[in-house]
Image (cartoon, rainbow, N blue to C red):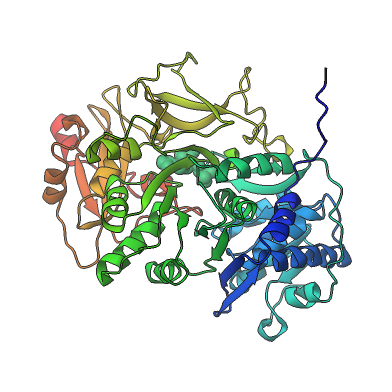
Amino acid sequence: MKGLMQDWPLSVTTIIDHAARFHGEREVVTRTVEGPFHTTNYKEIHLRARKVAQALEKIGAKQGDIIATMAWNTHRHLEAWYGIMGMGAVCHTLNPRLFAEQLVYIANHAEDQFILVDLTFVPVLEAVADQLKTVKGYIIMTDRAHMPETTLKNVHCYEEIVEAESGDYKWATIDENDACGLCYTSGTTGNPKGVLYSHRSNVLHALIGGSADVMGLRSVDVVLPVVPMFHANAWALAFSAPMAGAKLVMPGSKMDGESIYELLDNEKITTTAAVPTVWLMLLQHLQKTGAKLPALNKVIIGGSAAPRTMIETFEREYGAEVIHAWGMTEMSPMGTLGALKAGMEDLTTEQLLDVKVKQGRAVYTVEMKITDDDGVELPWDGKAFGPLLVKGPAVAGSYLKSEGGNILDADGWFDTGDVATIDENGYMQITDRAKDVIKSGGEWISSIELENTAVGHPDVAEAAVIGIVHPKWDERPLLICVAAEGKNPTKEDLLSYLEGKIAKWWTPDDVVFVDEIPHNATGKILKRALREQFKDYVLPTASAAE
Ligand code: AMP
């Protein structure tokens, strides 16, 4: 027997409709790419999103087209998102930090029809425009006064074409399973692969994202998504915040410690989310200036492992609760978050930190398991570790154009490429990316844990650990550090700091200092580049072993 409830398609347009109707005056504040702050509200965003849809249709875009954005988090990007998705097209968020070659591959593979681009990235597109085979035109996201000289062809001024429209527009009729968003992931081997989100998967994911033990968004919250919209949907915040009626503050292009502090302070941000690199810059700024953050309640840290000292500093010195999050582009992106559970009230501070450094427990709709190499499920004891597999309605079932073939096993599980433990309470902890794990004498060493411990040293700004070939042990860890500003730590300082904090046999065989550690387009340490850089490195322990 079928249920007798209404058929109400889960379309992302319902989110902005709801925000405009019930939270119309709630503000969206942006640090614009042009410089000054700009304030609008959900009612205006809703109106302008419909104008964007009209303007795009006028210049030739159609339902089902892939329309790209290459833009920072701004009010314009937000209204363009809803406009593109609302006209039944697919919003493809291009990551501007990609190498030119990857960018060309991705835009051609996706068959992007138009690109909406921020002023910052016009030169990036100019450099590759003659290789973009399907792009019919560019919309520069600024007003007439700021339009640049450009070699791009078929260029439109965003403000001009948007403001020429009335906004009298009815969203396209869509099926909730229609595609609405596209984001390429470069995490796996081979070419980047497109993850194609549906209206339904995004709405479900946004509902989950806003829920109490996930990001816990309320209408009284003021949310700063530092995590870019071009990185896995800004962790659903561009959907979850309007859904809740929370105020949004968009950071534009400036993500240095001082600029982020300015937003946190001026706008009295309650909830914010970013990768650890951003928080590192903020904490350095706070420590230098002695500033405090009285309004801040919640800091969501994900994308890479949050170091223990970072969690401790936010919680102890700044009174903000840290929620450690793990996910991936293929998961929309949230998979697990580390909110505490009942029964943990009496844990000591150190025990609480032990829980918080873990990547957290699965959000509703995410199924999760770890297996051994033969695919047999491993126990949830916090010790056994193996490949982490997931399932759910907001998890990719295949990549765009079936790139990479069948990505699910016979039972529908997706292999995340991460290696993890899961404890008795369901808290998952990433040991490593499968390809980054260091194999020493047949046992595994977690590069993530070593990095996070090393970065706790006050004189270290950033740390990376890679495996170096070793004649006896197969591989041994090399610790690569960037010294904190004005500091000069030595190998001995680091090794004695690690003593007692890690298993003795995990101790790195050497420590080197570099000016900079390379990062990929989403801010993760580029282990591949480090392995290349140090491929001929000989560990001091290597000759002794021979
Ligand atoms: P992306 O698709 O670019 O978001 O990358 C996803 C990958 O980032 C995951 O498979 C993990 O390897 C890594 N990752 C994300 N969040 C965390 C975290 N909190 N701790 C450790 N690794 C993480």
- Number of numbered callouts drawn: 0
**Residue 79 seen from this side:** yes
Residue 34 versus residue 472 in the image, above or below: below
Q: Nearer the viewer, residue 406 or 190?
A: 406
* Image quarter (top left, top right, bottom left or bottom right) of the N terminus: top right
**Residue 537 seen from this side:** no
* Image quarter (top left, top right, bottom left or bottom right) of the C terminus: top left
Residue 535 versus residue 418 in the image, above or below: below
Percent across and percent down for residue 410 are 63, 17
Question: Farthest residue toward the bottom?
Answer: 145
In the displayed structure image, the side of residue 468 where residue 100 appears, left or right: right
In the displayed structure image, the side of residue 140 where residue 259 appears, left or right: left
The residue lying at 53 percent from left, 41 percent from top is 334
Q: Nearer the viewer, residue 442 or 292?
A: 292
Percent across and percent down for residue 475 are 29, 32
The residue lying at 59 percent from left, 55 percent from top is 230
Q: Nearer the viewer, residue 402 or 263?
A: 263
In the displayed structure image, the side of residue 318 where residue 372 appears, left or right: right
